[in-house]
Image (tube, coloured by chain):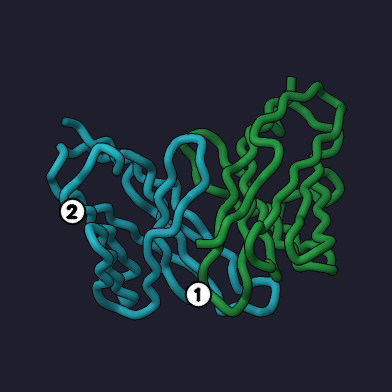
Amino acid sequence: GAVVSQHPSRVICKSGTSVKIECRSLDFQATTMFWYRQFPKKSLMLMATSNEGSKATYEQGVEKDKFLINHASLTLSTLTVTSAHPEDSSFYICSAGTSSTYEQYFGPGTRLTVT
Amino acid sequence: GQNIDQPTEMTATEGAIVQINCTYQTSGFNGLFWYQQHAGEAPTFLSYNVLDGLEEKGRFSSFLSRSKGYSYLLLKELQMKDSASYLCAVRPIRGTTDSWGKLQFGAGTQVVVTP
């Protein structure tokens, strides 16, 4: 199956700093990438949908100025958590796919801890 | 609103069968997915149902009844490696270019397989 990578897998940062998370589709071109957030023992919550070359579409309640998403190519999307706070600590997962199939392929996730 | 319910946890012994139920109430319906997620890892695709009935794939089967807003995932001949969280996800609407893949996830059912 298709492979999606995320980098870094774990990151610890201090309050007020910014963190960038990369999501790459390694063996296919993804027209769309999705960013999710997951709290322990909780559901995946969709944060935003990102199409290559256009602005991301954010879900209700997600601050677009805080969670900056860039989808510059068909294989790379980045999520930048700006001015991070401890409440931003979470597991962030991206997924990638194309509109021609029904499947999304998930990355391995990034564990963010803000101290 | 959107509501996807599944049990929090189920325990079964190796070799047994376990059925994980999922009920949903969403604003629309265009398919139901089951994913397996091991702790700290990305979800992996198990099955996709868009029409009523049973889909069988090896030891795993998935059933859908759209009129009842109900699905189940059946795991047969349980193995220790099947211990994981199983996520039910609904695609509420047929996609536009940026919404084709939007999924609403349940909170997941933690399956514990004992020797």
Amino acid on which the number 2 mark rests in the picture: Lys
Using the image as rendered, state which of residue B8 and residue B61 is in the foreground: B61
At x 59%, y 79%, the residue is A100
Q: Are marks 1 and 2 on the same chain?
A: yes
Quarter of the picture containing the C terminus of chain B is top left
Please provide percent x and percent y for residue A45. Answer: 59, 50
Q: Colour of chain A?
A: green
At x 30%, y 40%, the residue is B81
Horizontal side, residue A20 vs residue A4: left or right: right
Does label 1 or label 2 sit earlier along the sequence? Answer: 1
SS under mark 2: loop
Using the image as rendered, state which of residue A85 and residue A3 is in the foreground: A3
Please provide percent x and percent y for residue A19. Answer: 81, 35
At x 66%, y 31%, the residue is A10
Q: Which residue is label 1 attached to?
A: B28
Q: Which residue is label 2 attached to?
A: B76
Amino acid on which the number 1 mark rests in the picture: Gly
Using the image as rendered, state which of residue A25 and residue B24 is in the foreground: A25
